[in-house]
Image (spheres, rainbow, N blue to C red):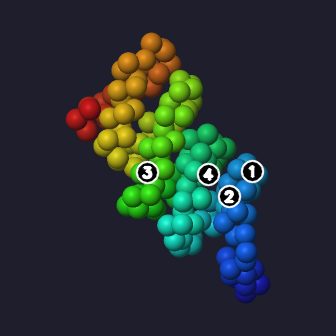
Amino acid sequence: MELFSACHEFRHSAGFISELSLALADRLEQGTALRFIRDDVFADNELDDLLPGIIDAAIEGDIGNVPLARSVLHKFRKNGLLKEKLASSLSGYLEAEDYYVYMRVAELLLELDYFDLKAVFVSKCKESDNEDVVEVYDFFADEFKADGL
């Protein structure tokens, strides 16, 4: 009962969203923050602040937290705010042309199934001279082709 009471008090405290955002940025606290977000309900104005950290955890977070971060994003998949935030952050991730980042982005886009964002990703992969990027595309080519890309 004490844990429930503590969670309730935390949820209604000033700075709640700021604290969760800080926890998302801290690899030691990231998993706890993601579980808290997964198990709670948030207004769009709260999600607006939290989504960048959740997206980052799903792409560049601690490898043990990537599946949890994806499950949190999947929970908010039908909220247009997620697609908007992901679209605005996608170019930053793709500029790096890093194999690991491209793998995580491909997995996330396939899971969330946003056709237009997958199309942007596939186009970037096809235009790239970076062998790592091409390798990621080749790895997922059948899945992208099945989606008509």
* Left or right, 67 with reference to 80: right
Q: Is residue 66 visible?
A: no
Res. 96 mark: none
Label 3 sits on what residue type? Glu
Of badges 3 and 2, nearer the viewer stands 3
Neighbourhood count class around disc 2 (C-alpha, 10 Å): few under 14, some 14–19, many 20 upward = some
Label 4 sits on what residue type? Gly
Q: Are marks 4 and 3 in contact (CB under 8 Å)?
A: no
Res. 53 mark: 4
Question: Which numbered disc, 4 or 3, marks the residue that appears first in the sequence?
Answer: 4
What residue would you read off at disc 3? 84
Q: Position of residue 67 (x, y in %)?
A: 55, 50
For the residue labelled by badge 3, is the local secondary structure a helix, a strand or a loop? helix
Against 122, residue 19 (above or below) is below
Q: Residue 142: which quarter of the image?
A: top left
Question: Which numbered disc, 1 or 2, marks the residue that appears first in the sequence?
Answer: 2
Res. 21 mark: 2
Distance CA(mark 1)–CA(mark 2) = 9 Å
Distance CA(mark 2)–CA(mark 4) = 6 Å
Question: Which numbered disc, 2 or 4, marks the residue that appears first in the sequence?
Answer: 2
Distance CA(mark 4)–CA(mark 3) = 14 Å
Spot the residue most to the left. Answer: 148
Residue drawn at point x = 67 percent, y = 76 percent: 11
Neighbourhood count class around disc 4 (C-alpha, 10 Å): few under 14, some 14–19, many 20 upward = many
What residue would you read off at disc 1? 26
Distance CA(mark 3)–CA(mark 2) = 18 Å
Residue drawn at point x = 54 percent, y = 71 percent: 42
Q: Residue 126: which quarter of the image?
A: top left
Q: Are marks 4 and 1 in contact (CB under 8 Å)?
A: no
Along the line of sight, the residue nearer the viewer: 25 or 70 = 25
